[in-house]
Image (cartoon, rainbow, N blue to C red):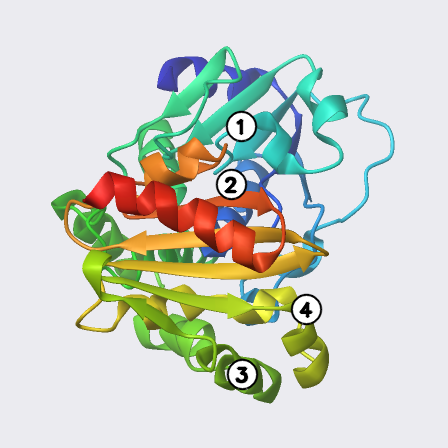
Amino acid sequence: MIKKIHDIIRSGSRFLISSHVRLDGDALGSELALYYALRDMGKEAVIYNQDKTPRIYTFLPGIDTVVHSLDSLDGYDAVFLLDCSDLERVGDEWSRIGVMGTVVNIDHHVSNDFFSAYSLVDVDASSTGEILYRLMHDMGVTITKDIAVNLYTAILTDTGSFRYSNTGSFTFTVASKLVQAGADPRWVAENVYEARSNEQMQLLREALGSLELYEDIKTGVMVVSRTMMRNTGAMPEHSEGFVDVIRSMGSVTVAVLFQEISEDYYKISLRSKGDVNVEKIAAHFGGGGHVNASACRIAGDIGAVKKKLLDVLRASLL
């Protein structure tokens, strides 16, 4: 498959790059790294994301090139969909993008449904950024500082600062190569983890008031409601990392964050430690992700949504 993707890139001249809604560091870092690689090869590239860029990632090189609307899709030789487990995760434009002539699917989620004939999916990779590094290395692409910063950010964020079980020896090898190419670990970490806004901290304070612990299944649960966001002036992106606050508790094996995204509709983020597989829980509700980090969405009032999720989780653990 890598050779086929090489051929697609070499034979084309204009490419579209996109990723999933609710952008994270792996999605954005991978997109921007591929953008620079294609540009350095003399190709034209456009990055389209439905959602606006979260503030904490505005430091990434090239971030100002991202567009949030699509006109005609004529003239593109191929589209690269990065870090998307299924086509619909692109957002409202998925049906238009999905019928483009050549769609390249590059991802590392175990829930990826191989929606394209050109699917480079490695569930053992730490991140889509790690897969892209391998692709670029095989193609002989020079890893510039801009590419290095973006790929390092992709890997750093999707491994939880190299703490998650998806971190392997090759992950550290790649990270080392990226640092050698110009990525500054301190600077990237400061931008990602040490630039929280007042609104985010106020939202965290309110959310912590909802924290519940279920000792029988070693699970911690927290809720971020739209009322909380209105009270604090926060945006949905400000809840990023909250589920990891729960996961950091010594008594917790499974962390669950319920975020209200519209009336009686919740996005559920799941994190786990050890060999507890939360991807199966997410998949039960039509979601997916990784063994230790997954997400899904459930409709209903918060009481009913909690019960549905916890009943499935308890059945899985007990």
Q: CA distance from mark 4 to mark 3?
A: 11 Å
Q: Are marks 4 and 3 in contact (CB under 8 Å)?
A: no
Q: Which residue is mark 2?
A: 34
Labels 4 and 1: the sequence-earlier one: 1
In percent of width and height, residue 180 lies at 26, 60
Residue neighbourhood size for the residue with mark 1, other residues' Cα within 10 Å, grouped as few (<14), some (14–19), many (≥20): many
Specify the quadrant of the image occupied by residue 127: top left
Q: Which residue is mark 3?
A: 206
Marks 4 and 2: which is nearer the front? 4
Q: Residue at x 76, y 23 (%)?
A: 96
Marks 4 and 1: which is nearer the front? 4
Q: Which residue is mark 1?
A: 86
Element under label 1? loop
Q: CA distance from mark 3 to mark 1?
A: 33 Å
In percent of width and height, residue 148 lies at 39, 55
Specify the quadrant of the image occupied by residue 255: bottom left
In percent of width and height, residue 280 lies at 33, 35
Marks 2 and 1: which is nearer the front? 1
- Which quadrant, please, contains the N terminus? top left
Q: CA distance from mark 3 to mark 2?
A: 39 Å
Labels 4 and 3: the sequence-earlier one: 3
Q: Which residue is mark 4?
A: 226
Labels 3 and 1: the sequence-earlier one: 1
Type of amino acid under label 1? Asp
Type of amino acid under label 4? Arg
Element under label 3? helix
